Amino acid sequence: MILQLPRTNFKPLDEMERVGKQDLYEFIQTHNIRLPRDRRDAILQDILERTNGDYILTIGELRRLVNRALDSPEPKPSMEAELDDEFDY
């Protein structure tokens, strides 16, 4: 269906496809969002279950996830890691 108005034409877009786990995985890689490797699949699956793959809801969940990560203090490196960095040739 095309609605024509004076000097204006527009066509409603079809509904977007549902977001899948691969889409989420590519998104977190592209935007360098770090998730614990051992929980990554469970976190992504949880997002999809809460949003049913709806694009707008999924973006909201990803924003919440990123904001929560930004609010968390970074873990302090261990003494061993500091020593490894010190003697990195």
Image: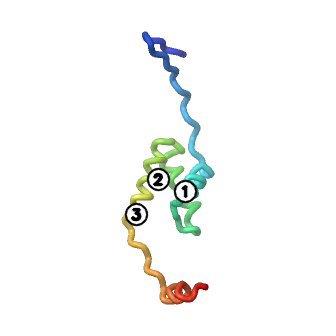
Q: Nearer the viewer, mark 1 or mark 2?
A: 1
* Left or right placement of residue 64 versus residue 84 in this view: left
Whichever of labels 3 and 2 marks the residue nearer the N terminus, that label is 2
Q: At x 51% / y 23%, what residue is drawn?
A: 12
Whichever of labels 1 and 3 marks the residue nearer the N terminus, that label is 1
Pointer 2 local density, CA inside 10 Å: few below 14, some 14–19, many at least 20: some
Q: At x 48% / y 47%, what residue is drawn?
A: 58
Q: CA distance from mark 3 to mark 2?
A: 12 Å
Q: At label 2, which amino acid type do we have?
A: Leu
Residue 70's label in the rendered image is: 3
Q: Quadrant of the C terminus?
A: bottom right
- Tell me the element at label 2: helix
| Label 1–label 2 contact, CB within 8 A | yes
- Tell me the element at label 1: helix
User: Which of the pair 52/8 is nearer the observer?
Assistant: 8
Looking at the image, can residue 45 be seen?
no
Q: Nearer the viewer, mark 3 or mark 2?
A: 3
Whichever of labels 1 and 2 marks the residue nearer the N terminus, that label is 1
User: Which of the pair 24/8 is nearer the observer?
Assistant: 8
User: Which of the pair 74/56 is nearer the observer?
Assistant: 74
Which residue matches tag 1?
Answer: 28
From what the image shows, is residue 72 above or below residue 85? above
Looking at the image, can residue 5 be seen?
yes
Q: At label 3, which amino acid type do we have?
A: Leu
Q: At x 53% / y 60%, what residue is drawn?
A: 32
Q: At label 1, which amino acid type do we have?
A: Ile
Q: CA distance from mark 1 to mark 2?
A: 9 Å
Which residue matches tag 2?
Answer: 62
